[in-house]
């Protein structure tokens, strides 16, 4: 496909025949066949598939012309469409936003609102494609504040619909945005759902959930809500060396931030109470086996995991506000007995 007529002639080994039969019906017939073959060798006209749309748009932008493709797609989204058509249009918008930055930047906040409205669609595939499109637009700074307005809706979706693909799309969007303070009350309500996703069997969703929780663990007003969140009895399985390295690394970063947060003077100024099945008890309680898991990860095949495991061990031994003084780093019976 995509060959020129001379290339097709060469493929069909017709050149010699054409030269040898410069006149006569045979030559005319062979030329007719060559031309017909050459036409067939050209690629088909561009269809409405996302790949063809992207190729056409890139080619036009390369020549300094606005392809108008994103605008055409957004206009199509405004029309009455069935769920499949809306899903495909949103998928094409996502591709074009990533490929055609100049055209995407020329869009308006009204366009972002239009895409955001698709989060209310009854079909999950439409919701997922809308989340992906918003994630693409979030890479353009001027749209971030507008996209933040949909944060509460995104949190509602990932906490009420058990769909791993939707979880991944929603969490990827949230992890690409600075979450404003007005979202914190909703974050408290969805914390159990985030913890469930973290303990699910979908690595992609787990990684995104832990990444968000690590970010939230740095917020003073959310730290207790995270630490007191209920977890499964086998929570520490997330620290097993058999877990994917990408997940292990995120879980260890999360543990380090929790340890640093609970050791801060601000947090220690209050006497907190935790339920028996809480994340705090699983990680930092007297019966926790976190120390054993961390020691096994110090010899993990991946160097980044080794280093992060050591960072968690140090954070457990040294309160954050005293860490600059070596004398303050002392073994704690809850983690490393006999100074291990």
Image (cartoon, rainbow, N blue to C red):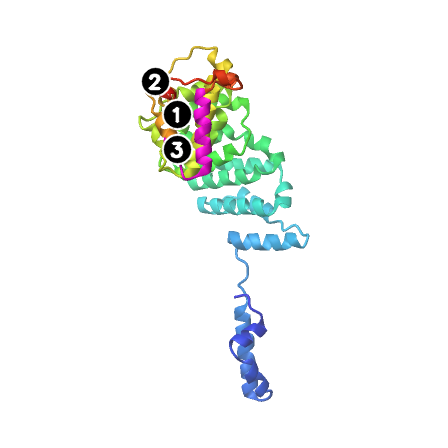
Q: Answer yes or no: do the residues labelled 2 and 3 have beta carbons within 8 Å?
A: no
Secondary-structure class at tag 3: helix
Q: Is residue 75 visible?
A: no
Camera-side residue of 227 and 102: 227
Q: Which residues are magenta?
A: 296-317
Q: Quadrant of the C terminus?
A: top left
Q: Position of residue 270 (x, y in %)?
A: 46, 10
* Closer to the eye: label 2 or 3: 3
Name the residue beneath numbered marker 1.
192
Q: Position of residue 166 (x, y in %)?
A: 43, 37
* Closer to the eye: label 2 or 1: 2
Camera-side residue of 201 and 257: 257
Q: CA distance from mark 3 to mark 1?
A: 27 Å
Lateral position of residue 204 relative to residue 113, left or right: left
Name the residue beneath numbered marker 2.
286
Q: Position of residue 20 (x, y in %)?
A: 57, 87
Circle number at residue 297: 3
Camera-side residue of 308 and 161: 308
Q: Answer yes or no: do the residues labelled 3 and 1 have beta carbons within 8 Å?
A: no
Lateral position of residue 65 relative to residue 322, left or right: right
Residue drawn at point x = 67 percent, y = 55 percent:
63
Q: Answer yes or no: do the residues labelled 2 and 1 have beta carbons within 8 Å?
A: no
Q: Residues within 10 Å of mark 3 (few under 14, many from 20)?
A: many
Q: Quadrant of residue 75?
A: top right
Question: Nearer the N terminus, badge 2 or badge 1?
Answer: 1
In the displayed structure, 23 sits above or below 210; it is below
Q: Quadrant of residue 249?
A: top left
**Residue 264 on the magenta span:** no
């Amino acid at each position: 496909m995509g060959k020129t007529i001379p290339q097709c002639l060469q493929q069909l080994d017709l050149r010699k025949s054409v030269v040898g039969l410069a006149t006569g019906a045979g030559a005319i017939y062979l030329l007719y066949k060559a031309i017909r073959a050459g036409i067939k060798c050209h690629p088909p006209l561009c269809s409405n598939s996302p790949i063809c749309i992207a190729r056409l748009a890139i080619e036009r932008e390369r020549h300094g012309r606005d392809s108008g493709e994103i605008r055409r797609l957004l206009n199509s989204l405004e029309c009455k469409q069935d769920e499949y058509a809306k899903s495909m249009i949103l998928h094409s918008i996502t591709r074009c936003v990533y490929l055609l930055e100049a055209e995407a930047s020329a869009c308006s906040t009204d366009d972002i609102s239009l895409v955001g409205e698709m989060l209310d669609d009854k079909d999950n595939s439409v919701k997922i494609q809308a989340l992906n499109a918003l994630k693409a637009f979030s890479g353009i700074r001027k749209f971030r504040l507008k996209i933040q307005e949909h944060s509460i809706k995104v949190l509602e979706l990932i906490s009420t619909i058990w769909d791993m693909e939707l979880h991944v799309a929603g969490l990827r969007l949230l992890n690409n945005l600075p979450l404003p303070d007005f979202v914190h009350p909703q974050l408290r309500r969805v914390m159990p759902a985030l913890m469930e996703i973290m303990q699910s069997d979908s690595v992609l969703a787990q990684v995104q959930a832990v990444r968000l929780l690590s970010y939230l663990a740095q917020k003073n007003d959310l730290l207790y809500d995270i630490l007191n969140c209920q977890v499964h009895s086998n929570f520490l399985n997330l620290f097993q060396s058999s877990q994917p390295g990408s997940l292990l690394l995120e879980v260890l970063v999360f543990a380090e931030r929790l340890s640093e947060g609970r050791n801060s003077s601000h947090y220690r100024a209050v006497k907190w109470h935790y339920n028996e099945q809480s994340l705090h008890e699983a990680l930092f309680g007297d019966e926790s086996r976190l120390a054993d898991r961390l020691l096994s990860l110090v010899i993990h095949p991946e160097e980044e995991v080794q280093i992060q495991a050591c960072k968690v061990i140090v954070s457990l031994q040294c309160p954050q506000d005293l860490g600059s003084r070596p004398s303050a780093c002392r073994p704690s019976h809850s983690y490393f007995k006999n100074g291990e």
